[in-house]
Amino acid sequence: MPRRVYTPRKQELPLKGDNTSIFLQVMISIAVFIFAITLSGVLSINSMLYNWNRSILGSLTVQIMPVNSANKEKAAAETLAYQEKAVEFLKTVDGIVKVTPLQDEQLKKLIQPWLGDGVNIDNLPMPRIIDIKLAPDADIDFAQVAQNLAQASPQASLDNHKLWLNKLIQFADGLKLIAMTILILVTGITSGAIFYTTQMSLGLHKNIIEILHIMGAKDTYVAQQYAKRMAFLGGSGGIIGLFFSFPVIFFIGSLARQIEGGIISEANLSFGDWLVVCSLPLFSLTISMTTAYYTVKKTLQKML
Amino acid sequence: MEKYREPETIIEMQNVGIRYDQGPEILSDIKLSLKKGSFHFLTGKSGAGKTSLLSMMYLQQRPSRGSISVFGKNINFTHRDGLAMLRRRIGVVFQDFRLLDHLSAFDNVALPLRVCGMDEREVRKRVTELLNWVELSRHMQDTTATLSGGEKQRIAIARAVINRPELLLADEPTGNVDNDIAPKLMKLFVELNKLGTTVVIATHSDKLINDFAYPQLHLQNRSLHIHYPSEISRLGGRHA
Ligand SMILES: Nc1ncnc2c1ncn2[C@@H]1O[C@H](COP(=O)(O)OP(=O)(O)OP(=O)(O)O)[C@@H](O)[C@H]1O
Ligand SMILES: [Mg+2]
């Protein structure tokens, strides 16, 4: 009686036994590990930048330090004169659409909470504050404005906090650029490694491929076997790398929160950001698969 | 009356030469036209170039000069996928078998069917049937590395004919099999030939050549000569 038991079909190309497999899997998991951490860095910098930009754009304040003098009336008048000069200058700056000096009442309301109810504000030298509205698309060099303002009106100073924020934004933009470069490099190096190991493997299995060809296999038949194998390595390597990146991402996040200052704490990953980070194994799967597929197609072109 | 029609040309070679690397030409100015349904032996001393000539026919080697048409298609102007489609119509038995030794006998024979995407149920049916016929169903699941030379040869032949090829090229197909199985395999080739398959068999065996009255493609001094059975019998063959 003929046997009716069939062992499952084996792949003609013994790719599972390749000792480059484990190398590629480890390499891809390391790549995804670095990628995940860097990417979450980029995404949180992005959300931070978004929040900072929102707070820096739109409005700005200028403070006029009170002139100190025994003669209170005279001091107040001089302070007002400085305010007038500052207002005049600010109106000439491109991107500033509205300049409003705060009235005494508004000033008192702002300052009272800082001093407590027991202090009579009227007896103190009063700083003046100018509220500035910026055009939505204003592209202002705050450092330059601050310098020009100080010349126009020595007692005036641009809001320090925002100047500092502006510098931070430039710094964060730089960081983002570096991170993006890392992402591109990691992707490039990994697909380069896949390219070379695939070529090596094709050379190793040249005899089998030749027989497959003579049996009538198209290049696609071979390419699909490689693509399948690399999809598995890319996907599984990606999941491993992602798994190990989570504790690191959380650790860096908690460090950032300890720095506090209200600024870094805005560097939270949103739900959408997490979705992007978690889809990285899918990304590594796709890259690995297509790299292998096209490497095979391209390399086999040189055979008859 | 049916009008006589010239049979289709399966393989056409014009001024074909082949050399390896920068070495001397192994074959020169080969001119050959194989008609559909013909049966030829390919003879010549060891090293005369039999395998080289066959490898150009099954499209593993390109000639270093001249032109080859297979099934009416000039291979120099045929796209890679087009060559694959031509190869699917050709069955090859290699002199050194070239089985995939990490696969089972079954998977080896199934190869030509699977590369063209045949349904797995049909594959099983056909392969099981043929392995029964070559008396190797016992070894169906054994890897071919564990088989004897003669068994490997029968697997190689089964792989070559599984796809019912239009052209069958066999390099010493009866070299390693027992005397009682050799005629059975020859009978298979003859049957296939009767069904329309064009056959070329390279062989050293005088017995085979003498037992079957087929014309010979004889390689000598780098060129090809065709001997017809009548001549062969004059030269000492048993069949006219
Ligand atoms: N791949 C190759 N590289 C270099 N030389 C080769 C190659 N294949 C064959 N040759 C040379 O070409 C010549 C013809 O070889 P071929 O294998 O075609 O002879 P053959 O007639 O099949 O011999 P046999 O009867 O022993 O199988 C030989 O001299 C051989 O050394
Ligand atoms: Mg030979």
Image (cartoon, rainbow, N blue to C red):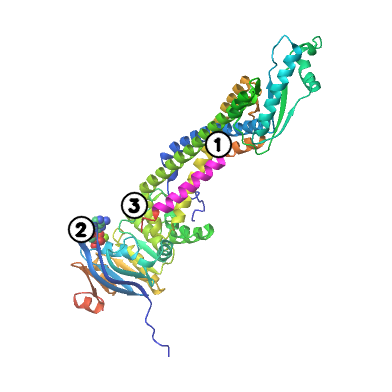
Q: Quadrant of ligand 2?
A: bottom left
Looking at the image, the residue that sits furthest to the bottom is B1
State the image coordinates of residue A56 (x, y, percent, origin top left).
66, 30
* Relative side of B24 to A22, left or right: left
In magenta segment, residue B100: no
Tell me which corner region of the image, top left, top right, bottom left or bottom right, holds residue A246.
top right
Q: Are marks 3 and 2 on the same chain?
A: yes
| Residue at the spot of label 2 | B23
Badge 1 marks a residue whose secondary structure is: helix
Please provide the residue range marked out in magenta: A280-299
Depicted A299 relative to depicted B24: above or below: above
The quadrant of the rendering that contains the C terminus of chain A is bottom left
Please state which of residues B26 and A245 is positioned toward the viewer in this rendering. A245
In magenta segment, residue A298: yes
| Residue at the spot of label 1 | A239
| Mark 2 residue CB less than 8 A from any atom of ligand 1 | yes
State the image coordinates of residue B49 (x, y, percent, origin top left).
24, 63
Please state which of residues A137 and A208 is positioned toward the viewer in this rendering. A137
> What is the CA distance from the residue labelled 2 to the residue labelled 1?
54 Å
| Residue at the spot of label 3 | B148
> What is the CA distance from the residue labelled 3 to the residue labelled 2?
36 Å
The structure residue drawn at horizontal position 37% and vertical position 58%, both measured from the top left corner, is B156
